[in-house]
Amino acid sequence: MKIMNKKLLSILIVLMSMSLTSCSKKDDVVIDSRDQFVSTYDINETYIVNGTTYTGHYSMTISKSAQDPTVILLSNFAGFTTPIIVTAVVSGTKFSIAQQTVQGSGFSGSGTISGSNLSFSYQQSLTGTGLWNVSATGTKM
């Protein structure tokens, strides 16, 4: 009977310890929503200038800002001959490009990501050429 009680007691202790550990608080998992954007993309864009439609094709790399946990850096944005970097703020699967001037051009716009597909539109203002409305899509390379 003593051996049976010891076995029963041992089983109860094991079960109780398992139940106590299963009730412990799990580590909170922090997800950086910018991670889904980080990659190099094959970009195709369409824009209209003075009534004429043009297309563009280039690669663009998105990385995370080291200074701001909500900001991404869009390198080679708009496919300029001299690559430029535009910043955007991420919220979930969306990003917004606040009005900014880079190398004499003004930019603002927004976009989304779904899986490996990026979709965005922006306005570009250039002195002497007016306002360009650009629509673009990209696929992770």
Image: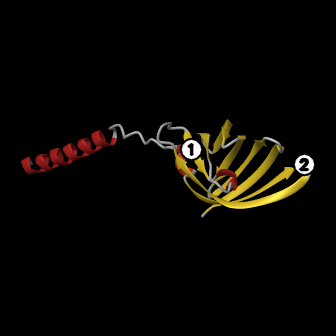
Circle 1 packing at 10 Å, graded few (<14), some (14-19), many (20+), is many
Taking the view exactly as shown, the residue that stands out farthest to the left is: 2
- Cα distance in 3D space between marks 1 and 2: 31 Å
The front one of 41 and 102 is 102
Q: Looking at the image, is mark 1 or mark 2 earlier in the sequence?
A: 2
Quadrant assignment, res 58: bottom right
The front one of 2 and 92 is 92
Looking at the picture, which amino acid does disc 2 mark? Answer: Asn
Looking at the picture, which amino acid does disc 1 mark? Answer: Ile
Taking the view exactly as shown, the residue that stands out farthest to the right is: 51
Q: CB atoms at circles 1 and 2 under 8 Å apart?
A: no
* Percent coordinates x, y for residue 54 in the rendering: 83, 58
Tell me if 96 is positioned left or right of 25 in this view.
Answer: right
Label 2 sits on a secondary structure element that is: loop
* Percent coordinates x, y for residue 44 in the rendering: 73, 60
Quadrant assignment, res 116: bottom right
For mark 1, what is the residue? 72
The structure residue drawn at horizontal position 56% and vertical position 40%, both measured from the top left corner, is: 71
The structure residue drawn at horizontal position 85% and vertical position 51%, both measured from the top left corner, is: 48
Q: Quadrant of the C terminus?
A: bottom right
Tell me if 7 is positioned left or right of 33 in this view.
Answer: left
Residue 19's label in the rendered image is: none
Circle 2 packing at 10 Å, graded few (<14), some (14-19), many (20+), is few
Looking at the rendered structure, the number of numbered marks drawn on it comes to 2
The structure residue drawn at horizontal position 54% and vertical position 52%, both measured from the top left corner, is: 38
For mark 2, what is the residue? 50
